[in-house]
Image (cartoon, grey):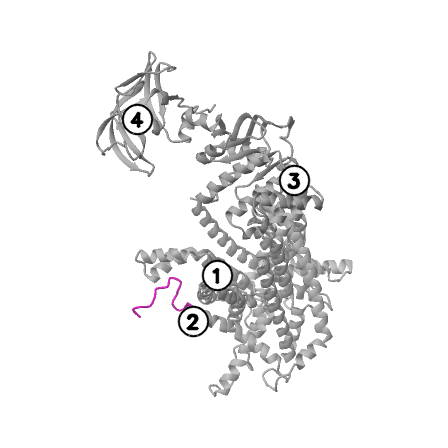
Amino acid sequence: MLDIRGLSKRFGYGKGEVTALHEVSFSIAEGEFFTLLGPSGCGKTTLLRLIAGFISPSGGSLVLDGKDIAAMPPNRRPVNTVFQSYALFPHMTVGENVAFALEAQGRPRSEIDPAVDKMLSLVQLLHLKNRKSSELSGGQQQRVALARALVAKPRILLLDEPLSALDMKLRKDMQIELKRLQRETGLTFIFVTHDQEEALTMSDRIAVMSGGRVQQIATPRELYDSPANRFVAGFIGESNFLAAKAANGAVEVGQGRMALEGAADGPLTLMIRPEHVMLAGNAPDALELEATVDQLVFFGTDTHVHLGLADGAKLVARVQNALHGTRNLNEGERIRIALPAKALRIVNDEEIAA
Amino acid sequence: MANRSFDVRKLPGAAAIAITCFVILYIPMAILVFYSFNAGKVIGNWEGASLKWYGAAIHNQAFLDAALNSLILATTASVISTLLATMAALATTRNERFRGEGVIHIILNQPLMVPEIVLAIALVIIVGQIKQVTGYTGLGFLIAAHTAFCIPFAYLPIRARLEGMDLSLETAAADLYASRFYTFRRVTLPLLSPGILSGFMLAFVISLDDLVISDFLKSPGQDTLPTYLMGELKRNLTSEIYAISSLLLLLSVLIVAGSWVATRKKD
Amino acid sequence: MNGPDTWRRWALSLPAVAVIMLFSILPLGVVLVYSFLTPGDFGNVKWIFSTDGWFSVLFERNIFDDTIGLSGANLSILFRSIILSVLTTLITLIFGVPTAWFIATRPPTQRNFWLFLITIPFWTNLLVRTIAVQEMIRSEGVFNRILLALGLIKEPIQMMYTDFAVLLGMTYVFLPLMVLPVYAAIEKFDFRLAEASYDLYASRLFCLRRVILPLIKPGVIAGSILVFVPSLGAYVTPRVMGGGKSMMLGNLIDLQFGQGRNWPLGAALSITLTVLVLLALIWYTRLTAGRKERDHG
């Protein structure tokens, strides 16, 4: 329903010119919960503001339902935003805030009042309708902002890091609440965040961005299991990277050697998630190495085992603290570890740039 | 001594100086008000309490004319200067710097940089010529001059309020289908109104306070309260002058109290 | 996109800019022109170029032997203006800073009351306040009457129309201008910083000197400028309190346009006064701009 084609944005002129977005292209389907994920300065907010119409693109097109909306001002676009700061009008009540969009469109009172009430009950705030927005708690303001953006039934709802101002507990609740709202309304959500966990738990698909470019677009599972490059692997979840050498269909790390398909001859980087590192030798089809236990860090549900390899490389293994079967390790102990072939990924060192 | 708590907010001697300061500020005004109730005409000789001089002031046509002139002048000048300052503030805040912005800034603040007496002399040279050539001697000159020097006073609080305003509110309004004008009417203007109000009040009081420029520019019969008071003061000191001064004092108490109540409600 | 927007912004600013250009800047330009003309016989000017106006600001020609000497009268008024303004600023500092501190450290509910008390004189007519302070020291005024009644003096002391009277009057009327900006600075001061300095073994004086004063300095400087600038250009207060005896620059300018009938000299004095004020303001912006740069660095 939304096709982004070669969209780019440059700020400034001459020497001061900065490209915030480099010809980004992808499509978003109807009813999708789509997340733009990346560190600050990656271009995700620029992309969101381009879709909302607060800034105009330097190039490319933005096609919504077959119509190019790139030149349309924000007050004509059927797209609404939940702002990071909520941007609730402080001089209006909750009800007036929610009614704003419909009043601005010049809808009749008879239509506005029931719509506002319906929206406020959807976010469970009907009882606060006559409160000033400044008298609300953070979580309540958040829900007013949602109701205000949803009331005019936009084609797409944009959410600009809407949970970043909330504390941990409230954040988890709102994640579930948002997901529920999205299912109930069947709306397309475009969600911006720098929090990978938030992105993984809520999204149907995620676009990982860096340096004004999309690095990878995939489902949360695919992103975690098969990151496209070292940046994506490092940004999503925790990862170990190992420098390796490939020759004749096998990879070599220190003294360890193992057959691995798809490895081109020459130096390469291997990635493995900490929970896949096995603290035992003699595993079939795995890369076996000798390591020293540098440090044990207790995390409650599991323990992080920091390991040093003979060549100085570092690895982290995560072991569950099960009642039985946890091996007793000591710092300074030398052990054998195994990295299963199934869990090893060859990752591209370069992120997508030029 | 040993057990006295250590208060970082305490500055030894500050309270004593502050109280002295308030006493010094208020005693002269209290004495002025006190003598305004003197039944006698000569200020020093207390001849019993009376509202006589307030009565005299209320029936003094020259005083009433001056009060009316002051009111017309202050109202007109502050309304116009607030309007112009609001427009200028909207144009010069919350934007990327534009060509000429620095110049506009200096011009808008220029009347603050020139001593009142210099501005009065400067205006009298020009206005004198215009009066001769056109024959017009109305309040227009005073209104124009007051408007000019009130603009920076109205501009400062309005601009400060605008700069403190959350830009995302207007963006949010645009996102919610509001046109530029609708956004201005429903979001910008209501949020700006406390700034406009304090700008207006400041301009009003500054205009009301002005003695020098009015005194130099006025044509016969155009006395304002301060110029009337100054004229009377030159002749001799009477209890009526103190009564009129007390009325002006009361007016400023009312204005300050009013503005406090107004801002308290807004917040 | 910058183009039309710049036009819109200029158009919005134009009415205010035009009013100030016409009724403040243009007249000032005329004053500059007048300072280079020849005095007319009955006031006003003759359109003949002359630098006599400027010459007379500092010098005078002896009418008998045509020698050139420094103009004692003008110079003494110039010095008096500067010295009285500096003294006014210093005295308001001594009273104003502790007062601002006192108000800022009251509990919030009481603070409004004290602020209210400082704002009332601020909004009260300058002439009314000058009349109030005049009542204190005039010959038949409060002080003299008390002293006479107590038998401490036999004759009233002449305090009016002296430099002391002008200084007292200016201090009285400009004091609130010092308190308010200093208060704003102290109110913003984070007292945890003072706690931190005491925790690090600072004495009260050391804390005041090294932590508090540097952080409230912008307010103190702003207050000083707010007092110094109107003091230098003061006209009403010296006219009432100083009469013809203790004149300041503002009164001298008035005199040249009135009885003196030397408009070019008055105009030159006006420009001199304006330049002095501008120098003070430029010094102030330099000081604050320098701080901003350091903050960024």
- Label 3–label 2 contact, CB within 8 A: no
Mark 1 lies on residue: C183
Name the amino acid, label 1.
Tyr
For mark 3, name the chain: B
Q: Position of residue C236 (x, y in %)?
A: 59, 68
For mark 2, name the chain: B
At numbered mark 3, what does the secondary structure look like: helix, strand or loop? Answer: loop
- Closer to us: mark 3 or mark 2? 3
- Label 2–label 4 contact, CB within 8 A: no
- Which of A169 and C295 lies nearest the eye of the viewer? A169
Q: Which residue sits at x=61%, y=43%?
A: A119
- Which of A225 and B48 lies nearest the eye of the viewer? A225
Vertical relation: C29 (above or below) C97:
above
**Are discs 2 and 4 both within one chain?**
no
Q: Position of residue B51 (x, y in %)?
A: 65, 81
- Label 3–label 1 contact, CB within 8 A: no
